[in-house]
Amino acid sequence: YLLQLYQPLNIFGFVYRGIKESLNEMERMFELLSVNREVQDAPAAPALAPRGGEVRFNGVEFAYDPRRPILKGLDFTIQAGHTVAVVGPTGAGKSTLSRLLYRFYDTTAGSIRIDGQDVRDVTQESLRAAIGIVPQDTVLFNDTIRYNIAYGRPGAVQEDLDRVAEAAQILDFIKALPDGWDTMVGERGLKLSGGEKQRVAIARTLLKDPPILILDEATSALDTHTEREIQAALRDAARGRTTLVIAHRLSTVVDADEIIVLEAGRIAERGSHGALLAMGGAYAALWAKQQEAV
Ligand code: ATP
């Protein structure tokens, strides 16, 4: 009798080990992709229903390592269609804000809401569909430039591609290539410059047409001409969208509705460019320092 009981358990154990091994495989894969497995959809989570795209950080605290807090209680709102720029010294936690909004990580305390909906309560898929990111460093697929831009919205027609490439100020560049839209790019194809890659990312994002935009400004300086072109393209892209600008330099923040100066995970100053200059504090000092460097 005992033996009879033992048999099925043994079989179960065998199957269980199999599952466990493939789970380990998956864990390794996720590690490679650096996906955080702690972020999971709540059971039966609904899709995010964006309206205007208001973004609200409410008492947000965060640490990658519990022994070292990075964000120490942040409160700010980006009204629908407005632009908030975050500036501050390196390591202050600026890029971390965008990772939390995109829900690569969950906050340790406090919440992030889009049109009143906590990002933890909605599906990750719907959250990420509502947010476009123009990252500091765009990774291109080893494929055509067409594929790399159309990736923003599979099924896009040529007319759409032309429109977004023009808005991102890269259409003339593409047309001048011998193979045009069919030019292979990426590691094994044509290597694009930092500025060109960023424009591909802008075009891709425009095609996705999200209500919320995260612009993670490049740390490396581009030449003045390219920089101006990219800024114009970014300004167009931000129009009518709720935009969070992560500014590693100060060049893109002047027109923001609000500038937040982040220092060691806390808001040190906030206001418009003019108001912050008039205050003569940390922002004014950063600005003066940058003007010297130019
Ligand atoms: P910069 O202007 O240099 O890009 P930042 O203000 O954007 O800086 P963050 O990238 O948000 O800074 O990083 C804030 C802090 O968190 C840094 O001290 C960094 O070392 C730490 N950090 C960032 N990413 C991770 C991670 N994946 N694991 C552990 N610590 C991290």
Image: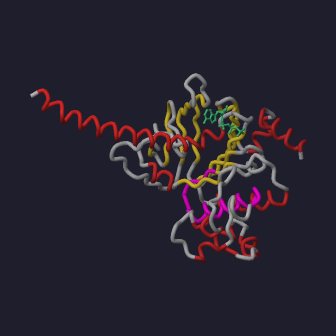
The way the protein has been coloured in the rendering is secondary structure
Q: Residue 11's spot in the image, x, y percent?
A: 23, 38
- In the image shown, does 276 or 160 lie closer to the viewer? 160
Instruction: Give left or right: position of 85 versus 129.
Output: right
Q: Total of numbered circles in the picture?
A: 0
Location of ligand 1 given as a quarter of the image: top right
- In the image shown, does 185 or 279 lie closer to the viewer? 185
Q: In the image, what residue occupies the spot 76% across and 49% down?
A: 254
Single out the residue that lies furthest toward the left: 1
Q: In the image, what residue occupies the spot 80% across and 40% down?
A: 277
Instruction: Give left or right: position of 119 versus 255.
Output: left
Q: Is residue 212 magenta?
A: yes
Assign the N terminus to one quadrant of the image.
top left
The magenta region covers 192-214
Instruction: Give left or right: position of 287 versus 272.
Output: right
Q: Residue 129's spot in the image, x, y percent?
A: 50, 56
Dominant secondary structure of the residues highlighted in magenta in the image: helix
Q: Is 96 drawn above or below residue 54 in the view shown?
A: above
Q: Residue 259's spot in the image, x, y percent?
A: 69, 43
Question: To which quarter of the image does residue 240 belong?
Answer: bottom right
Q: Residue 250's spot in the image, x, y percent?
A: 77, 45
Single out the residue that lies furthest toward the front: 3
Q: In the image, what residue occupies the spot 55% across and 43% down?
A: 32
Q: In the image, what residue occupies the spot 46% across and 48% down?
A: 124
Q: Is residue 250 magenta?
A: no
- In the image shown, does 171 or 245 lie closer to the viewer? 171
